[in-house]
Image (spheres, coloured by chain):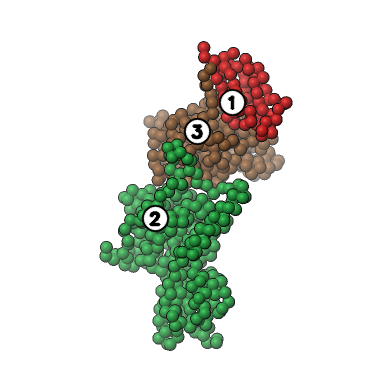
Amino acid sequence: MSKVLMKGNEAIAQAAIAAGCDAFFGYPITPQNEICEYMSKYLAKSGGAFVQAESEIAAINMVYGAAGAGARTMTSSSSPGIALKQEGISYCAGAELPCVIVAISRGGPGLGGILPAQGDYNQATRGGGNGDYKVVVLAPNGVQEATEMMRDAFLLSEKYRNPVMVMADGVIGQMMEPVEINTDPLPKFEKPWAATGDSQSRGTRNVINSLFLNPVDLENHNIALRKKYDLIEENEVQVDLYMMDDADVALVAYGTPSRIVKSAIEEMRAEGIKVGLIRPKTLYPFPFKQINAAADKVKFMLTAELSMGQMVHDVRLAVNGKVPVYFYGRAGGMIFEPKEISDAVKSHLGGE
Amino acid sequence: MKGRVTFNTDRCKGCGLCVSVCPVKLIELDKSVVNAIGYNPAYPAYPDKCIACTNCAIMCPDTVITVERLDD
Amino acid sequence: MTVIFQKTKGLTDTPFTYCPGCTHGIIHRLVAECLEELDILDRTVAIASVGCSVMSYEFFNCDAIQAAHGRAPAVATGVKRVLPNKIVFTYQGDGDLASIGTGEIVQAAHRGENITVIFVNNAIYGMTGGQMAPTTLPGQITTTSPYGRDVSKQGEPIRMSELMAQIPGAAYIERVMTADPVSVRKAKRAIKKAFEIQKNGGGFSMIEILSSCNIGWGLSPVDSLKYIKEDMAAYFPLGVFKDKGAAQ
């Protein structure tokens, strides 16, 4: 298949269908509307179910039902809608249901704005719902990678029976880029646990549930979930290192902003400043080890985010005091330019 | 006697609904017994009066009662 | 001797967790009997809600999914859309359906989801200790209306069957009660009709069942049945409020 120029939201939707998505439940919210629109137009054609729910809360609970019944299912929304889904996502994690949540982030807090931002990092990586649970969070840096991460998301969600979020900033949702969508069918995962209704012939009742009134059972359940997350943290970290071999300074950025940071790196490199980029592709599991190792070779790090500073805390955790970790950010939908990043780096270089 | 009621005594919570709906008043709570879950269970005090109407079983919230009808 | 009444295969062996005399137990049995008699146990997915009946997934002898508080109709929608030939029903109390879940129940009917809703109305939040519900009667004392429901501040109880019947997508809405053997038999007929409608692809059905909460009401089990018949049924009239099938 040759490359096709596609809008991010539509490419994400088509990639989901190509990955075998059976059911989509959504709700209108800018800047992700085209995902719902695309699904309403094409999902039924491939035999899938489409429902525009009455709210983001209802949508995630429809996902909970469909996933519990064994379907490959997803929802999509943007920041305020993702906030509404948090309880439902906690239920999906508690009941160990595979599902995909696409989050096209916009400025906050509250109604905020509709332009791109990265202010939902904490909610996505810490979990905005109740209890100790984790959601795998994939952060594409463009439309092509977003389509690839949609496949990863479905695979990982079914491999680990856990919700997976693809969190893309609003830029990716709205911009057009040439893409080539992988249409090889994903393997079908056996789901003997699913509540498909045929309990009598199966000989056992399948129950999808996250309620454990007995504290011994609930603690054991938490311990079992933790083992799963340990496995994820061990095996599923994805991170890109760019020009880090000889870097004196490491910039840490994800999503579209990481591409702006690359431009800044080229500028600085031209001026003889050896800067590199660490780009987490998975926000959870976060590349703590890789960042900690990089801290041995650089004078300081600086995270560049479209927020008031959220990932910077994880980078500091990773670095564990070896070197200073500075922050530069824009919020509200404002997007920094390469020069702002270079100036920020130089301001800290000057300080030596 | 037209019927017979049998009680799964250890599942009865002594709520008395069966007692209140039996048209011939044959069921009573056995104050002399405490069942496995700590209640005075219902029992057929006058079994011969049973007319197999199934009212008791219909009103039982815990599926304690089985009703049989005498084959005529 | 021939057995003319015995425990239905539609229920598991797990004893009910309900208070002595609570009519949840009767309603569970009626639903289970219908599932068995309509021979759909092997096609059914039960959606449990949150309230006293939260553990109904332990009692119904079929596959089940436990839903977040108020969201059972959405969960049922998700299941039905991916398993269209399976039977899906929700079992919800008045707190779950008429308070936090008002949006979901109205919208499921609005979409005409081909599901069945068993709506148990006992005018109180039982599980959490007897608080006022949207269906608590005027003047009724609960732990959050200790001076009796004051309609000037807490509004008049909501009549869900009448409200739901206005929704074009709703196919069958009936209100019944469990106050005595006659009304329980009628309630079973209504529940069975709802499941038959679903089996025939007839669309959204909801049966509202006036039920008891003797602990929350502070009445004996027998007096609670009287309260259902005399007080509840007076405010919540029984009857069929929508029957699309019959209208055709």
Instruction: Tell me the crowding category of disc 1: few under 14, some 14 to 19, or many 20 or more residues within 10 angstroms, Cα based.
Output: many
Q: Which amino acid, by three-letter code, is at mark 3?
A: Gly
Chain displayed in brown: C
Does label 3 lie on the same chain as label 2?
Answer: no
| Chain A, chosen colour in render | green
Q: Is residue A302 above or below residue B65?
A: below
Q: Position of residue C242 (x, y in %)?
A: 46, 33
* Local SS, label 2: helix
Image quarter of residue A264 = bottom left
Q: Is residue A274 left or right of residue A220?
A: left
Vertical comparison of A309 with C108: above or below: below
- Check if mark 1 and mark 2 are on a common chain: no
Quickly name the residue at label 2. Answer: A36
Residue at 56% across / 47% down in the picture? Answer: A211
Name the residue rendered at 57%, 17% in the picture.
B3
- Disc 1 is placed on an element classified as strand
Residue B41 visible in the shown view: yes
User: Which structural element holds mark 3?
Assistant: loop
The local crowd at label 3, few if under 14, some if 14 to 19, many if 20 or more residues have their Cα within 10 Å, is many
Question: Would you place residue A347 above or below residue B33 in this image?
Answer: below
What residue is at 43 percent from the left and 58 percent from the top? A156
Residue at 61%, 36% (x, y): give it.
C18
The chain that hosts pointer 3 is C
- Name the one closer to the observer, A71 or C95: A71
Which residue carries the number 1 mark? B65
User: Mark 3 highlights which residue?
Assistant: C10
Tell me where residue A88 appears, x and y as whole percent: 51, 52
